[in-house]
Amino acid sequence: MDALLLVFALLVLLMAFIGFGASAVWLYRMFRRNFSAPAEGENAAVPGAPPACAAALPSLDDTPPLMKPHTPERETSGQSPEKDMTKPSPRTEPASSASDRQQSLPRPGFAALDVMHSAGVRFAVVGVVMLALLIPLGFVRGIVNERAELYNSVVQDISKTWGGPQNLDGPLLVVPFTENHITESRVRDESRPANAPDAYRLVKSSEQVLNHMVILPRSVRFDGTLAPEERKRGIYRSLVYTAELGLNGVFVLPTREEWTRVAPALNEIDYRHAYVIMGLSWPNALRSVSPFVWNGRELRAEPGTRPMRMSSGFRVPVSVDAAQGEYTFSQKLVFNGSTGLRITPVGDVTELSLVSSWPSPSFRGGALPVTREVSEEGFHATWNIPSLARPFPSLAAMDEWHADFTDFSVGVDLFESSTQYQLIHRAVKYGILFIGLTFLAFIVLDLGLRARLHPVQYSLVGLAMVVFYLSLLSLAEHVAFGAAYATASACAVLMISLYAAAALRAKRLGLGAGLLLTALYTLLYAILQMEDYALIMGTGLVLIMLGALMFVSRKLSYEREQG
């Protein structure tokens, strides 16, 4: 989009420079033709002037006009005109009167200095008007950005109360254990001299250090349903959802050998104070939490994620017997959220199934779904992620655990193709292009039908097209974008077509301008809706505009303008 605007801006500048250059050369030649000095001592006629006008001009030399005798013509054919001029004339004319008459005589070709009839000047004026219209377009773009920022702040405020993008991390089984840490230190022997070789001896000490082992499930499955809905605050609307998520799986306790492989100084494992920890980015959005079923027993959860270093979530105290070795779990969560849902695949095999009635999903994360079905009725997607796909191990001590393990997640966003502010912002980017196409149509009328438009009229037409975007913004905040676009474009087309008909004094030309604007605004709406093809369609419009400029100016030349 920015590249397209740059190309079009260069095109406008090129048109303005060409127009200014053509106008400068044309003016130079015109003034040179009208004000060039004749040969000394001669009544030189201005090039291009009719013979009668040339004969009527007084001498252009520096000598002030003198009183000359006036002799009427004689019908006698044999008498020389020179002899008649020797006799004094009864009528004399003051020098000032002759000078005044000399100044009052029209100079041949001076009426041709109507610069607005020059095609080059008209191109230059239109180019300047288009560049000046970038200023109000910039103001409109600033208003759109300001309203969009206000909308985003309202959405964030709704997320604080309803729930933001949810990220579910877990379940993780955390088991405390102790390990022997041996330290060595040098201790001075007081019975020996300080400078004796054996004055210091090496002492080893052992202490029990508490640590925690993070155990990931052997398998885990998530089944979720996302119910989208719309929340309003004032004139602003935000898309949110309510998720019903069920999870179940199996934990398999590691063997002593697997423990010692991770913690070589293992001393004792405390299975009695184990926890199952679940991380949730917005726990205040939880609506209901079913009991955590641990190997057939219902257990209650408690807030907090200690000893795991998670920002938010909850934990469930569980009782573990090493002799049993395998434990099943299940739970059901209902929570609110917005934008999307992410789940960290913590199992050796993680299965995820999400269903929603939202028709525009955007699948995100470190792995795409294995299967997905998307239709107007909604979507259904499933993931199957093995442990080798993730960057963290299934068993690790807490002091070696990846604190950023939540970066690898999978999920979906409830994608909104474009908010009204994004659509309006894109429409404003095409503003100068559509103003240029409209001005091009009026230039064609200037050159082809000789229907002159004043620069002020060009400016008013451009300002009316700028106000269209402001009308679109104000209406789109209250009604659907399609209805707002239809209303704003209809007002702009009606206003400009009626003004063109009055300015050009032809209803037929006003009707043609209205049809042109209708086609342009219809094309703009199609470009806004077809986001993937917006660039190629906009580029095509620039090429069409450039080709039309070449076509209407193909027969222009300085000589033809002078003629």
Image (cartoon, helix red, strand yellow):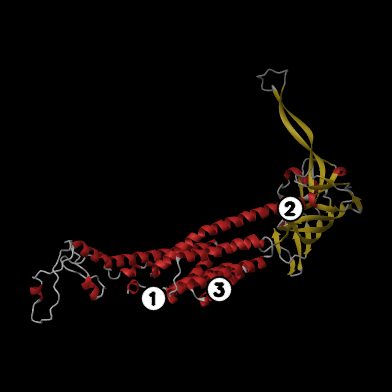
Observer-nearest of 55 and 530: 55
Q: Nearer the viewer, mark 3 or mark 1?
A: 3
Tell me which numbered mark, 1 or 2, is placed earlier along the sequence. 2
Q: Where is residue 326 in the image (x, y as percent from the top left)?
A: 87, 53
For badge 1, the amino acid type reads Lys
Q: Nearer the viewer, mark 3 or mark 2?
A: 3
Q: Name the residue under label 2.
A: 158
Observer-nearest of 234 and 198: 234
> Which residue in the rendered view is the most extreme toward the front?
90
Could you say whether the residue bearing mark 1 is in a helix, strand or loop?
A: loop
Quadrant for the N terminus, please: bottom right
Could you say whether the residue bearing mark 2 is in a helix, strand or loop?
A: helix
Q: Name the residue under label 3.
A: 514
For badge 2, the amino acid type reads Ile
Q: Is residue 391 visible?
A: no
Quadrant for the C terminus, please: bottom left
How far apart are the two marked residues, 3 and 1, measured between alpha carbons?
Answer: 28 Å
> Which residue in the rendered view is the most extreme toward the right?
297
Q: In this view, does 355 lie to the left or right of 431?
A: right
Q: Where is residue 201 in the image (x, y as percent from the top left)?
A: 71, 25
Question: Could you classify mark 2 by the number of other residues whose Cα lies within 10 Å: few (under 14), some (14-19), or many (20 or more)?
Answer: many
How far apart are the two marked residues, 3 and 2, measured between alpha carbons?
Answer: 43 Å
Observer-nearest of 314 and 154: 154
Q: Name the residue under label 1.
A: 555
How far apart are the two marked residues, 1 and 2, measured between alpha carbons?
Answer: 62 Å
Residue drawn 25% across the image and 71% down it: 47
